[in-house]
Image: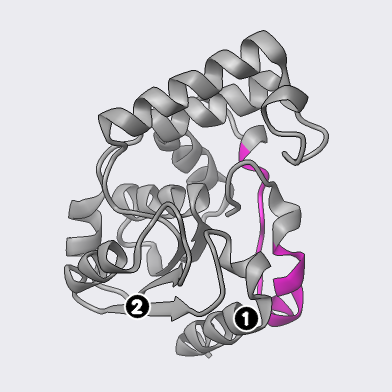
Amino acid sequence: MHAFPYDERMWEPQHDVLAGWDWMAPSLYELPGASVEEWARALLERVPDEIVAVGASMGGYLALELARQAPERVCGLLLAGSRAGADSPERRAFRDETIRTLREQGVDAWNPDAAPGYGADDFVRATQALRDRADASDVVASFAGPFVLVVGEHDELLGVDEARAIVETAPDGRLEVVPGAGHIVGLDQPGRFNEILREFLSTWT
């Protein structure tokens, strides 16, 4: 599950690792609703089997919500650059400003590098979902399966110390710090991220 404001195409460097797996990489902007909870319900209806959830940033928040709603079906979690807590008041204010910019000036004025093919309304819904998501610290603390949190050495949104604190609450948690990477580890250092992903998936082979 992809990060914001990317789409499922951000996972192209991981396709070779996923060969042989029954996998899907949905566009979150095309899921119904404007909340992480609604997105999770839609995906759980779409995928009736057990799930190993991999998510980057926004996608990681959705992975945690999948584990909240269906803990018996989510076997493992690999998150990249995703914190467990809800948005701080300062971060919520930043999201509100993003929504205003999108509505008043459009996508190109806000972020010309955002995933092509989507309009301001799509990114507004995603921003609302990010802003209003619930604290998932309890999900991490109760998750029984393998939990891996990947963070870039230079991640400007999730620091290494915060990431370590999150992992320490997980019953079966592991932290992977990727040198030279920022917030989107899978794009910044795809080789190292692929190694982590391959090792993680080997749990189920």
Q: Position of residue 47 (x, y in %)?
A: 56, 53
Extreme top residue here? 104
- Precedes in sequence: disc 2 or disc 1: 2
Tell me: residue 108, above or below residue 42.
Answer: above
Extreme right residue here? 117
Which residue corresponds to the image point at 53% horizontal and 91% vertical from the top-left?
205
State the residue in front, 133 or 146: 133
Q: Which mark is residue 194?
A: 1
Which residue corresponds to the image point at 51% horizontal and 89% vertical from the top-left?
199
Tell me: residue 121, above or below residue 118.
Answer: above
Any magenta on residue 18?
A: yes
Looking at the picture, the colour scheme in use is one colour
Q: Amino acid at mark 1?
A: Asn
204 sits left or right of 4 in the view: left
Residue 74 can be seen, yes or no = yes
- Disc 2 crowd, CA 10 A, few/some/many (<14, 14-19, 20+): some
Specify the segment rendered in magenta. Answer: 11-28
Q: Position of residue 45 (x, y in %)?
A: 52, 44
| Secondary structure of the residue carrying numbered label 2 | strand
Q: Amino acid at mark 2?
A: Leu
72 sits left or right of 197 in the view: left
* Residue under numbered circle 2: 175
Any magenta on residue 152?
A: no
Tell me: residue 130, above or below residue 144.
Answer: above
State the residue in front, 173 or 107: 107
Q: CA distance from mark 2 to mark 1?
A: 15 Å
